[in-house]
Amino acid sequence: MDHDKKKPETLAAQGLGWIDEHTKAVAPPLHASSTFLRDPDNQYRSGRSYARTDNPAFDQPEQLLAALEKGEAAMLFASGMAAATSVFQALRPGDHVVAPTVMYWSFRHWLRDFADRWGLGVDFVDMTDLGAVKGALRPGKTALVWVETPANPLWHIFDIDAIGRLAHGAGARMVVDSTVATPVFTQPLALGADIVMHSATKYLNGHSDLLAGALVTRQKDEAWARIAAVRTQQGGILGSFESWLLLRGMRTLFPRVRAAAANAQYLAEALVKHPRVGQVLYPGLPDSPGHAVAARQMAGGFGAMLSIRVKGGEAAAIATAARVQIWKRATSLGGVESLLEQRASVEGPDTPCPPDLLRLSVGIEDKSDLLADLDQALSS
Ligand SMILES: *Cc1c(COP(=O)(O)O)cnc(C)c1O
């Protein structure tokens, strides 16, 4: 039975079902070698010479992720940022790119700075407004449209299919940061993306114990080869142990992410009714502005990230965060443990994030424990 016929849950749980040829081990060996033996006639028939180009430790997690995203190939990177920045470093000075105003803030920050020094034209637009996306595209000049959905930290939903049509119509490629949606809920390549990006630090690994990034491509084309060259030459590659840990984390991706998203839906529905909560930002709420598009492009859940706006402003939000006991006050997301943070202070002065906003990364703990802790923290 080939991989195409197996369900993604089966592929993930079994790490593609590989068994080590030599030892029959069910869990993969940890490959630590930086270099590989040449044949006596000076060839490298194994296809490997040095681990900055490619490392056997990447094979299984890359192939599993490519299978889950239904892409032709995947590449691991040292972090989500290393993956995302490589896409832009493979562009040419003078190229034009379009990105959303609401997106992972450190990447927006990097992009603005890098665009300036690299001579890229960049337009940040409200991608919930397709007219704005269309207006920003410069046919023949726009090389790339960057989409992140659901988008940090307001969980705006961008219509991958519609934006992809506009991008392709203008001769641009579309890359989707699908860190929050995960392959469990969204398949951006099937919706028209050329490349999917993940901060594998988050849900793919799921245990808050490594940094990693990944790209998956629909086609192994020239643009993909340029990104691969950036990875090899700049050396932003993942370590062997992290690759091994990432595969281990990915084996439980589906049950983890589904449990966390079910908790998030429960909390969102309960928190809308809370007297100290001004607003709940979560695409799973039927009256959320992104709900209709999310219901179309996310299958089986709306993710496990939500934000709440605390009545009483910034001070009340910070005081609420100070009182949590089960939730942990920390940045990042996608682990099995629930985290929250007052987000605006992380993002700095140019953030679209209101100061009364707490960002919640919902884990897989008992949902009533999570709600009771938030309730006491909001109410004291
Ligand atoms: C964390 C994150 C990144 C950056 O990934 P790192 O692994 O921290 O470098 C990019 N995009 C999103 C949506 C993220 O949550």
Image (tube, rainbow, N blue to C red):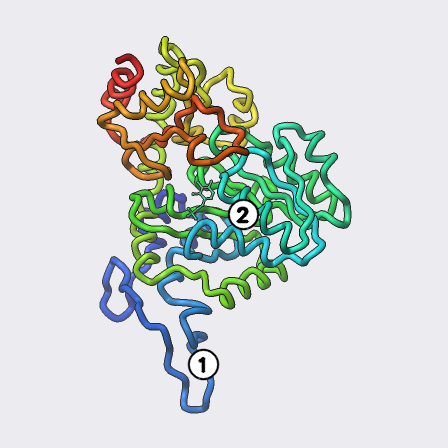
Residue 42 or residue 100, whichever sits in front: 100
Q: Which image quarter holds the C terminus?
A: top left
Residue 82 or residue 190, whichever sits in front: 82
Left or right: 64, with 87 as reference point: left
User: In the image, ligand 1 is in what quadrant?
Assistant: top left
Q: Are marks 2 and 1 in contact (CB under 8 Å)?
A: no
Left or right: 65, with 380 as reference point: right
Secondary structure under tag 1 reads: loop
What amino acid is found at the position of numbered circle 1 in the picture? Tyr
Q: CA distance from mark 2 to mark 1?
A: 38 Å
Q: Which residue is mark 1?
A: 44
Left or right: 27, with 269 as reference point: left
Write down the quadrant of residue 229 in the picture: bottom right
Residue lying furthest right:
139
Secondary structure under tag 2 reads: helix
Q: Residue at x 43, y 61 (%)?
A: 237
Write down the quadrant of residue 305 in the picture: top left
Q: Residue at x 30, y 68 (%)?
A: 32
- Residue 215 in percent (x, y) is at 50, 52
What amino acid is found at the position of numbered circle 2 in the picture? Trp
Q: Which residue is mark 2?
A: 110
Q: Which image quarter holds the N terminus?
A: bottom left
- Residue 39 in percent (x, y) is at 41, 86
Q: Nearer the viewer, mark 2 or mark 1?
A: 2
Q: Is residue 191 above or below residue 305?
A: below
| Residues packed near mark 1 inside 10 Å, few (<14), some (14 to 19) or many (20 plus) | few
| Residues packed near mark 2 inside 10 Å, few (<14), some (14 to 19) or many (20 plus) | few
- Residue 242 in percent (x, y) is at 32, 57
Q: How many callouts does the rendering have?
A: 2
Q: Residue at x 50, y 39 (%)?
A: 105
Left or right: 189, with 61 as reference point: right
